[in-house]
Amino acid sequence: MGEFDDLIDCLPHEAPALFVDEIVELDPGRSIRGAITFPTGHRVFEGHLPGEPIVPGVILIEAMAQVAGLSLVAGKDGERKNIRGYLAEVRHMRFRQPVGPDSRVEIHATLDRQFGPTTRFQVEASVNSQCVAEGEITVIGQVIDSE
């Protein structure tokens, strides 16, 4: 497991909608790398191309957005922030090849531009060092109350 995995606990998501297994690298305010493996039998494969299980593109987008959102939680100084990221926009997303069961998907999100609470990331998902999806994701950070 990655040394930054405690960040995952900051996501409000729970299984089966949590799409981050580990955070493998963090450069606060610049980039973050995470990963997820969709094992055979995972719910994302139910009813999606029976007989040819493929991770739906929208699930890959959500996984990339969750990793990017964790970059906001980490903050530029590396201290945890009480911020929740909400997916605001997906642009120029391209799917290069399908992702099947038991593939470890590595996700890299690099901060492209920040304007107020809105942050745009360049994102890439890869399997075995080959790009399977790439594009831009914009996340709006909203401060949450700590209770």
Image (cartoon, helix red, strand yellow):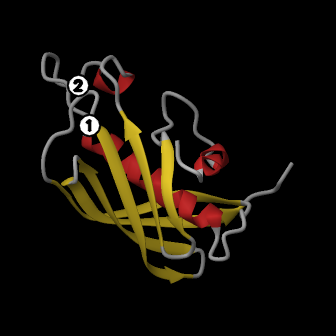
- Give the total number of marks visible in the rendering: 2
Residue type marked 1: Pro
According to the image, label 1 marks what residue?
56
Judge whether 114 appears above or below 39 on screen: below
Q: Residues within 10 Å of mark 2 (few under 14, many from 20)?
A: few
Residue 38: x %, y % from top left: 35, 30
Q: Nearer the viewer, residue 136 or 28?
A: 28
Q: Residue at position x 38%, y 22% from top?
A: 43
Q: Residues within 10 Å of mark 1 (few under 14, many from 20)?
A: some
In this rendering, would 100 be left or right of 117?
left
Whether residues under marks 1 and 2 lie with C-beta atoms below 8 angstroms apart, the answer is: yes
Residue 3: x %, y % from top left: 59, 51
Residue 55: x %, y % from top left: 26, 34
Q: Residue at position x 13%, y 52% from top?
A: 96
Instruction: Classify mark 1: helix, strand or loop.
Output: loop
Instruction: Classify mark 2: helix, strand or loop.
Output: loop
**Where, by quadrant of the figure, is residue 121 drawn?**
bottom left
> Which comes sooner in the sequence, label 1 or label 2?
2
Q: Nearer the viewer, residue 109 or 95?
A: 109
Judge whether 111 appears above or below 4 on screen: below
Q: Residue furthest right?
A: 147
**Where, by quadrant of the figure, is residue 116 drawn?**
bottom right
Q: Residue at position x 72%, y 67% from top?
A: 79
In this rendering, would 127 be left or right of 36?
left
Distance, label 1 to label 2, CA atoms, is: 7 Å
Residue type marked 2: His
Q: Residue at position x 53%, y 28% from top?
A: 15
Q: Nearer the viewer, residue 66 or 86?
A: 66
According to the image, label 2 marks what residue?
48
Judge whether 90 appears above or below 112 on screen: above
Residue 104: x %, y % from top left: 32, 39
